[in-house]
């Protein structure tokens, strides 16, 4: 068939384009790159000039002849019956034939150039994208359009095979994306603080069918057989975003919920995940990201989770949701299996949020208590450590103990291995004691409670040689200055114990205060 050819578009797709469903430039690029993936390309190069506002997408697929391009133009909409896997064994991404049509809102014309190996014929076609995306366009009048083109012969290119898509006369939608304001102060933890190109890179790395980093701890779990497929943006290879430093829970082989089969890995960097858009689980269907990362509505109603934003990970869907993907390819239609799938991950995320919170609180509490920081509890260090260890044991941690002959060690040291779910407690051979040195004198401490309103000694009292009791209920022993007040109470008790008159008491207090707090 000669030129002009005819682009035939399903009315449902026109409705999508007219409603600006693909205002998201990265999502539109995802569809175009997915076309290349389905065509068994192994390399896609995206070139974007902000100055010239020109976009080119080049792939090394087998290419198209002019007659094959004619078929290509007539399959927009739900695809004709064809094999679900490609020659390279890839499960096809495309279902609705949106492909390059998703780019129409961003330009007035799409130019396509292609050739196949073994043929010297190269064709170049121009598709009037603007006809389908003007605000005044009537859907029923725009289901077909003429596509002009030319063919040329180049014997030097007989072994070449490629397809190039070029967006010309870009629209305000692309201009708006490329000129978006960067507000680093307002959105400091968001990709909205990135430059346009850095944001585009991040968004593409989150949704394209590309490989995770080589050293990724989740890659062997969620993508055990990575595809031979690479994408570059202005010459820089794109690598899938991955913020998991430690896997908390994952699938063992293929997980199944109803008819949905998948791999998954949930993990954490043991701090808040940044940027904000990296929090939650990246859902992939046939290697392609679907919608934003999500927590499956966990925490929207009811209990909040203080460490939920520490969780991130991936879910790679293998079967069961191909027919449930919506037309815009950014969500799934509701159904019994999908509802069960969502509840499965709500439960996993809830469990991991509690785990991360308990581990972090235990680590912080033990560290504060061992270092006698202002955040330390007014209680026995051994008792505090024991309480936190029990907290982790309820989370599945195993406890190992060992002793040391280190005479300088007075408190047990605690090593929490989150990866192996173990707690190693190293204790001195003798019974560990809480001690405090005030004004040059070291006291053994016992923590207890009494009614300070009814007792002469409010915060502490001497009970033996170099032994003192601390009242855990004394109100000044709370807050940032509690250590200062504790030391003052010990000084008062010591001064009262070592003097017999008011004059001696006054002088003793002055002396002890200077010795304890003079930093000269």
Image (cartoon, helix red, strand yellow):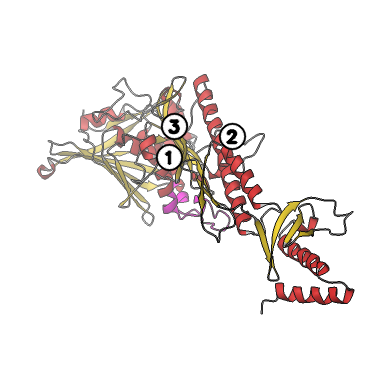
Q: Residue at x 37, y 31 (%)?
A: 286
Residue 151: x, y in percent? 18, 39
Q: Residue at x 45, y 28 (%)?
A: 327
Q: Is residue 275 above or below residue 72?
A: below
Q: Is residue 513 above or below residue 345?
A: below
Quarter of the image where one finds residue 351: top right
Quarter of the image where one finds residue 349: top right
Is 228 left or right of 121, judged from the image as shown?
A: right
- Nearer the observer: mark 3 or 2; the answer is 2
Q: Nearer the viewer, residue 464 or 178?
A: 464
On residue 146, which mark appears? Answer: none
**Do labels 1 and 3 touch, CB within 8 Å?**
yes
User: Is residue 365 part of the magenta span, yes or no?
Assistant: no
Residue for badge 3 = 329
- Nearer the observer: mark 1 or 2; the answer is 2
On residue 298, which mark appears? Answer: 2
Q: Give the range drawn in magenta.
A: 174-200
On residue 27, which mark appears? Answer: 1
Q: Nearer the viewer, residue 155 or 144?
A: 155
């Amino acid at each position: 068939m000669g030129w002009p050819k005819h682009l035939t578009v399903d009315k449902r797709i026109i409705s999508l384009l007219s409603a600006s469903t693909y205002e998201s430039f990265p999502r539109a690029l995802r569809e175009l790159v997915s076309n290349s993936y389905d065509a068994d390309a192994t390399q896609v190069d995206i070139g974007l000039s902000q100055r010239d506002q020109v976009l080119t997408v080049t792939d090394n697929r087998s290419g198209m002849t002019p007659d094959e391009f004619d078929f290509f133009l007539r399959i927009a909409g739900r695809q004709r019956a064809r094999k679900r896997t490609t020659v390279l064994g890839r499960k096809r991404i495309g279902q609705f034939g949106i492909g390059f049509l998703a780019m129409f809102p961003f330009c007035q014309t799409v130019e396509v150039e292609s050739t196949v190996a073994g043929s010297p014929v190269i064709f170049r076609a121009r598709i009037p994208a603007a006809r389908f995306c003007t605000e005044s366009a009537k859907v029923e009048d725009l289901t077909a359009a003429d596509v002009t083109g030319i063919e040329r012969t180049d014997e030097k290119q007989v072994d070449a095979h490629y397809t190039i898509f070029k967006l010309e006369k870009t629209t305000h939608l692309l201009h708006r994306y490329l000129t978006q304001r960067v507000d680093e102060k307002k959105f400091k933890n968001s990709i909205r603080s990135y430059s346009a190109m850095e944001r585009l890179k991040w968004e593409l790395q989150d949704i394209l069918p590309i490989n995770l980093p080589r050293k990724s701890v989740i890659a062997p779990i969620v993508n055990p057989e990575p595809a031979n497929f690479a994408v570059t943006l202005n010459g820089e290879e794109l690598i899938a975003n991955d913020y998991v430093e430690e896997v908390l829970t994952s699938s063992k082989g293929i997980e199944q919920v109803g008819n949905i089969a998948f791999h998954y890995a949930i993990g954490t960097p043991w701090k808040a995940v940044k940027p904000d858009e990296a929090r939650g689980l990246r859902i992939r269907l046939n290697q392609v990201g679907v919608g934003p990362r999500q927590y499956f509505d966990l925490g929207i109603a009811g209990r909040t989770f203080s460490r939920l934003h520490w969780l991130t990970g991936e879910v790679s869907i293998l079967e069961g949701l191909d027919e449930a993907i919506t037309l815009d390819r950014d969500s799934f239609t509701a159904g019994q299996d999908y509802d069960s799938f969502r509840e499965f991950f709500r439960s996993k995320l809830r469990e991991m949020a509690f785990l991360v919170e308990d581990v972090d609180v235990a680590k912080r509490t033990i560290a504060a208590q061992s270092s006698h920081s202002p955040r330390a509890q007014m209680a026995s260090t051994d008792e505090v450590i024991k309480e936190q260890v029990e907290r982790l044991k309820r989370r599945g941690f195993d406890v190992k103990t060992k002793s040391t002959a280190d005479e300088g060690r007075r408190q047990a040291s605690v090593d929490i291995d989150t990866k192996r779910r173990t707690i190693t407690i190293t204790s001195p051979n003798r019974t560990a004691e809480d001690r405090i040195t005030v004004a040059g004198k070291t006291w053994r401490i016992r923590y207890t409670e009494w009614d300070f309103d009814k007792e002469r000694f409010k915060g502490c009292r001497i009970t033996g040689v170099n032994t003192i009791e601390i009242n855990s209920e004394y109100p000044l022993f709370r807050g940032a200055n509690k250590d200062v007040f504790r030391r003052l109470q010990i000084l008062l008790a010591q001064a009262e114990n070592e003097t017999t008159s008011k004059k001696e008491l006054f002088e003793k207090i002055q002396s002890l205060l200077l010795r304890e707090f003079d930093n000269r």
